[in-house]
Image (cartoon, rainbow, N blue to C red):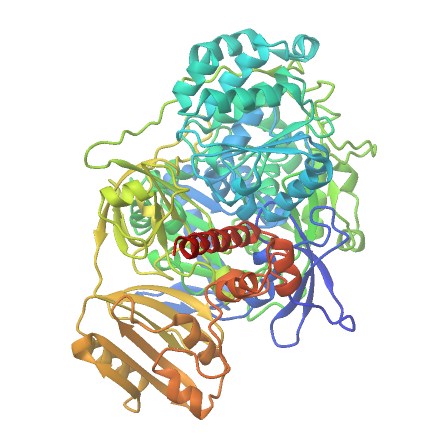
């Protein structure tokens, strides 16, 4: 973690990654970067940051930044233009398309990375003044099932609990959540609770992740059977006297129907075991533990949400909490772990196509209320298209114009090849972005608008516990970049709506947003921050993190629903009777496996930010597919080899990781690699575009797939001070490294062709070692005594040490000894190979850790004392424990061998 010079001024801001909403102290370093530390005063993280947050200072550079507006000219190339020309062009084309085809021929696709003020203005323009609800967001891909489940049960998209409940619960149930990697700051709070108070942890997931390492019980259920599990739990609670009948009677409706449906799905422990693939013993243990523990928090994330039955899964969980009145109480609630920094803020302003602003819906009273507040005569009167539907409509030619702001749908959407092809059919394709190039930009944008990035923009975000925090600028705006709210507002003015979009600051937008939340509310709606609607600019700038609701009469509350008062018409919660769970797609002889997709510890979305950090790229630098040993043997796969994964929608070539923690019949592949950072790893292209009927969220966890070995004769890497265009025949994955960029490569082409390629990019003066007969080629060019470009190729086990050469590359000028040893690919005197990075926060490699274990470290705590590994975010602690266990096993086996001899 980067330390801060106390003589410099630190800015208090909020992390731009997951929905934990950690406070950050950022101090510019004077060279375009920043020193970063956690904000100890922020209640979300109390000073702790994860590996990604700790490395934020490495991601604020201007490499590949879009710095001025660009428009595609008649020659087909993108040309720089003035802001006025770009904005006039967009407004003219929008007006023409709306006049010709109607407002529903237009769409906006937004991002959980936007600030609330950006979101608010975009939604107001499209829904209020253009008159279409075709505004959706990439939050549809991660949290829409939670939204739909909350609305069905509570009448509003309300998160009942707060983070303090994680400290006070006696049972923490994680469902479809690898919180140890994806929400490590919150997970460490849970571990602290376990250590301090003895809280029990249950993990429910088809995949055995690092989160399971500290679990008291792991339930590795069959994919798609969460509803059956929680239906079985509801039946158990009813049959063993664990219901709160008074709460059910006074504050809810629909219990009998929900229980009857649960009995038909999983009417006993035996029936639940049959449906889920779990043992009756484990199920009984979980059911009894839940029934006997009043303070229980059930935390769920993408494994629940990213499903064609995700909304039913959410409601099956909520049913169990309503039935026991374990909701909105200290240490007791269902809790949705949000994936993006402002997915919640986007939901508050109506960022989803089936919502209006301020948690209002497309009902006649709400439509009229928002219309009057906005003075918007053209307000949309019905829901718009959800993300997958939206891109299908673009493909059919029904949507003619699209504005994408701050997201990369050509990578992240399911059936991503079809989504990318659809973008090419648009008459007008506008993108507001930070980067000059990504898969979506390269799909044929007509207009590129430079937006401010994190560190440059100012406004608010809302985290998973409903806490509104300020993001503050601590870097100057580069080039001609502008706030997203300003860009949208300028287009709105040119469309004739100047009076409604005359904002001078983010604070002015926030005040309007807060006032709308309180407008004709009087406690009838959950989202109310009217108490903040009179903040002047100075007070807004100084605003400290605050939970909503924050009403005008200053009556706030931490939790919802402990005493009823839901947001349905009769103020009672709804039990929901879910459908019988079944996956919507079937495996078959040609597609015998199921592909599960998700995140890895140190990367974020499509790497446009995290990919800039050498630290974050060092842990898992190559796109991979995880396979159970039995499936690997059946399909002829070896650990460290390559495989081609194919579905009905696309294919990828990925490194094979054989792992017994992976469930049989399942594959796992991360989502982060795109065409910008790998040659054949756009995993979104493999995912079926099947969606939940209520939430519209796609199922990203169970696509039928096949896998076959793919052989490469040569492996190796290229290191360069600048990005390179690699030969088309090569498999490659790019990673930022100290001093430049690295490419891990594999290929079957002739080595002499690579020699020619290197001479073309690096010049003729090369230091070379070649053994073409043995399949080995190594070469480097120099600038002074520092490596400028180098290429190492060889058979899989003789390609040189990537870690060692990276260190030499980053070291700058080499000694004579280091230069002589370079092409051996082995460490020179005084330079030890640290191995693959395990602790990204402090850059501690596996070899260093194993050396410390061999020297006597026997716990993660001891490793932390010696190396600092695991002492920041803690997300590497499970791996540290595994390395210790592996060492102990190896010592035991050696002891047995010595004794036998």
User: In the picture provided, is 409 more to the left or to the right than 4?
Assistant: left
Q: Quadrant of the C terminus?
A: bottom left
Q: Residue at x 54, y 40 (%)?
A: 351
Find residue 734 and report its horizontal and vertical position in percent.
38, 65
User: In the picture provided, is 574 more to the left or to the right than 698?
Assistant: right
Task: Decide which of 309, 572 is in the foreground and name it.
Answer: 309
Task: Decide which of 560, 636 is in the foreground and name it.
Answer: 636
Q: Residue at x 52, y 16 (%)?
A: 576
**How many numbered tags mark residues here?**
0
Q: Quadrant of the N terminus?
A: bottom right
Q: Residue at x 64, y 12 (%)?
A: 243
Q: Residue at x 46, y 71 (%)?
A: 737
Find residue 204 and report its horizontal and vertical position in percent.
50, 32
Residue 211 can be seen in this image = yes
717 is higher (above) or lower (below) than 553 = below
Task: Decide which of 9, 230 is in the foreground and name it.
Answer: 230
User: In the picture provided, is 246 more to the left or to the right than 340?
Assistant: right
Residue 254 can be seen in this image = no
675 is higher (above) or lower (below) than 208 = below
Task: Decide which of 23, 442 is in the foreground and name it.
Answer: 23
550 is higher (above) or lower (below) than 252 = below
Find residue 533 and report its horizontal and vertical position in percent.
76, 42
Find residue 720 and report its horizontal and vertical position in percent.
39, 77
Residue 300 placement: quadrant: top right
């Amino acid at each position: 973690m980067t330390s801060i010079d106390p003589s410099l001024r630190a800015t208090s801001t909020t992390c731009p990654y997951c929905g934990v909403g950690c406070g950050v102290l950022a101090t510019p370093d004077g060279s375009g970067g920043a020193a970063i530390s956690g904000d100890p005063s922020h209640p979300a993280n109390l000073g702790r940051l994860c590996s990604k947050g700790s490395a934020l200072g490495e991601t604020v550079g201007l490499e590949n930044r879009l710095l001025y507006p660009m428009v595609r000219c008649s020659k087909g190339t993108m040309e720089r233009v003035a802001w006025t020309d770009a904005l006039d062009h967009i407004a003219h084309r929008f007006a023409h398309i709306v006049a010709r085809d109607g407002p529903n021929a237009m769409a906006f696709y937004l991002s959980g990375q936007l600030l609330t003020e950006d979101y608010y203005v975009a939604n107001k323009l499209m829904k209020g003044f253009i008159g279409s609800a075709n505004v959706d967001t990439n939050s549809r891909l991660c949290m829409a099932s939670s939204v739909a489940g909350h609305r069905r049960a509570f009448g509003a998209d309300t998160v009942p609990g707060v983070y303090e409940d994680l400290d006070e619960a006696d049972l923490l149930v994680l469902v479809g959540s690898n919180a140890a990697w994806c929400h490590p700051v919150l997970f460490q709070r849970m571990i602290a609770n376990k250590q301090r108070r003895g809280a029990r942890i249950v993990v429910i997931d088809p995949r055995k992740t690092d989160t399971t390492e500290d679990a008291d019980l792991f339930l590795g259920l069959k994919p798609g059977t969460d509803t059956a599990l929680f239906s079985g739990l509801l039946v158990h609670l009813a049959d063993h006297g664990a219901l709160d009948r008074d709460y059910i009677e006074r504050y809810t409706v629909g219990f009998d129907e929900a229980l009857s449906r649960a009995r038909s799905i999983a009417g006993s422990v035996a029936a639940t075991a049959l449906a889920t693939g779990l043992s009756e013993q484990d199920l009984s243990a979980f059911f009894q533990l839940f029934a006997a523990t009043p303070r229980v928090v059930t935390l769920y994330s993408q494994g629940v949400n990213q499903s064609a039955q995700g909304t039913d899964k959410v409601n099956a969980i909520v049913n169990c909490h309503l039935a026991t009145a374990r909701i909105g109480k200290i240490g007791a609630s269902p809790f949705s772990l949000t994936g993006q920094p402002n997915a919640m803020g986007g939901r508050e302003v109506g960022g989803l196509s089936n919502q209006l602003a301020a948690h209002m819906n497309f009902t006649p009273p709400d439509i009229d209320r928002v219309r009057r507040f906005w003075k918007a005569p053209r307000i949309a009167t019905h829901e718009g298209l959800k993300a997958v539907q939206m891109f299908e409509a673009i493909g059919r030619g029904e949507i003619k114009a699209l504005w994408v702001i701050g997201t990369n749908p050509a990578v992240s959407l399911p059936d991503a090849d079809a989504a990318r092809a659809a973008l090419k059919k648009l008459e007008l394709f506008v993108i507001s972005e930070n980067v000059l190039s990504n898969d979506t930009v390269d799909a044929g944008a007509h207009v590129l608008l430079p937006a401010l990035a994190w560190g440059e923009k100012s406004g608010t975000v809302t985290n998973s516990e409903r806490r509104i925090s300020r993001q503050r600028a601590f870097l100057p705006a580069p080039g001609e970049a502008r706030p997203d709210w300003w860009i949208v507002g300028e287009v709105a003015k040119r469309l004739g709506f100047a009076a409604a979009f005359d904002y001078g600051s983010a604070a002015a937008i926030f005040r309007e947003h807060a006032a709308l939340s309180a407008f004709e509310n009087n406690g009838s709606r959950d989202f109310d921050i009217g108490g903040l609607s009179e903040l002047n600019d100075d007070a807004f700038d100084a605003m400290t993190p605050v939970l909503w609701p924050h009403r005008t009469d200053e009556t706030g509350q931490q939790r919802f629903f402990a005493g009823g008062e839901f947001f349905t018409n009769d103020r009672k919660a709804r039990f929901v009777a879910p459908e019988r769970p079944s996956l919507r797609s079937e495996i078959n002889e040609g597609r015998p496996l199921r592909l599960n997709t998700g995140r890895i510890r140190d990367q974020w979305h499509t790497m446009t930010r995290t990919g800039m950090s050498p630290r974050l790229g060092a842990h898992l630098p190559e796109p991979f597919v995880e396979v159970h040993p039995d499936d690997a043997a059946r399909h002829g796969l070896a650990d460290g080899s390559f495989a081609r994964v194919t579905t009905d929608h696309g294919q990828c070539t990925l490194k094979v990781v054989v792992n017994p923690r992976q469930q049989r019949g399942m594959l796992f592949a991360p989502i982060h690699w795109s065409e910008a950072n790998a040659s054949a790893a756009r995993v979104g292209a493999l995912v079926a575009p099947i969606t939940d009927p209520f939430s519209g969220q796609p199922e990203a966890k169970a696509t039928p797939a096949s896998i076959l070995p793919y052989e490469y004769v040569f492996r190796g890497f290229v290191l360069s001070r600048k990005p390179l265009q690699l030969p088309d025949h090569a498999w490659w994955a790019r990673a930022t490294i100290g001093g430049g960029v690295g490419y891990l490569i594999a290929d079957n082409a002739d080595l002499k062709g690579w020699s020619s390629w290197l001479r073309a990019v690096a010049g003729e003066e090369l230091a070379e070692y070649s053994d073409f007969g043995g399949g080995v080629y190594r070469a480097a060019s120099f600038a002074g005594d520092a490596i400028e470009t180098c290429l190492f190729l060889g058979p899989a086990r003789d390609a040189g040490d990537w870690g060692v050469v990276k260190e030499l590359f980053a070291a700058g000028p080499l000694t004579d000894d280091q230069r002589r040893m370079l092409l051996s690919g082995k460490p020179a005197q005084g330079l030890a190979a640290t191995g693959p990075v395990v602790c990204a926060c402090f850059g501690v490699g596996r070899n260093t850790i194993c050396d410390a274990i061999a020297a006597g470290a026997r716990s993660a705590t001891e490793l932390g004392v010696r190396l600092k590994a695991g002492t920041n975010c803690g997300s590497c602690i499970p791996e540290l424990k595994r390395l210790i266990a592996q060492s102990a096993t190896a010592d035991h086996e050696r002891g047995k061998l010595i004794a036998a001899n």
